[in-house]
Image (cartoon, grey):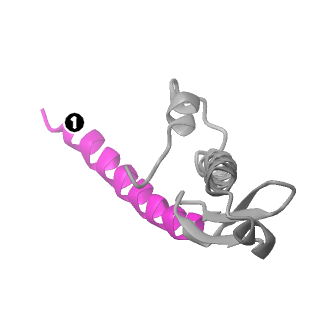
Amino acid sequence: MFKGLGNIAGMMKQFSEMQGRMQEMQEKLGKLRFEGSAGGGMVNVEANGQQKILAYKIDQTLLDSDDKEMLEDLLTAATNQALEKAREGAAEEMAQLTGGMNIPGLDEALAKFNPNA
């Protein structure tokens, strides 16, 4: 009758350990930096592994050109590139966390990983 309680206790311990590892992972992802650029480096965007934008760097000549539309396009492209690199980096870190376990659906979940959602 009480045999199942041991299994539950073991599962709860594993869950607690996984939560601790996930917290560590979030801290690690927050320290990782990824950069996207566009316009031959005229626009650079820095993001962290938590997919948060940290900084924009815009070349002064681009600002002086008064080409608002081009600036908007370059910002969008550089931001998307930085976020894609951040997603890929987060997926790699998460794969290390799981230790190569073959968990069904994990690859799809990691591809959609966004801790800010």
The one nearer the camera, 38 or 65, is 65
**Residue found at x 67% / y 45%:** 88
Between 35 and 114, the one lying in front of the other is 35
- On the rendered image, what quadrant is the N terminus found in? top left
- Give the residue type that dot 1 points to: Lys
Label 1 CA crowd tier, 10 Å (few <14, some 14–19, many 20+): few
Residue sitting at 25 percent across and 42 percent down? Answer: 8
Give the side of residue 54 with respect to residue 18, left or right.
right
Q: Which residue is mark 1?
A: 3
Q: How far across and how far down the image is residue 2, in percent? A: 15, 38
Seen at 59% across and 49% down, the residue is 94
For the residue pair 58 and 79, the one nearer the viewer reads as 58
The reply to whether the magenta stretch includes residue 70 is: no
In the rendering, at what x and y percent does residue 78 appear?
Answer: 69, 53
Residues in magenta?
1-29
> Which element carries disc 1, helix, strand or loop?
helix
Residue at 51% over, 25% down: 105
Could you tell me residue 71's position as x and y percent?
Answer: 66, 57
Total numbered circles: 1
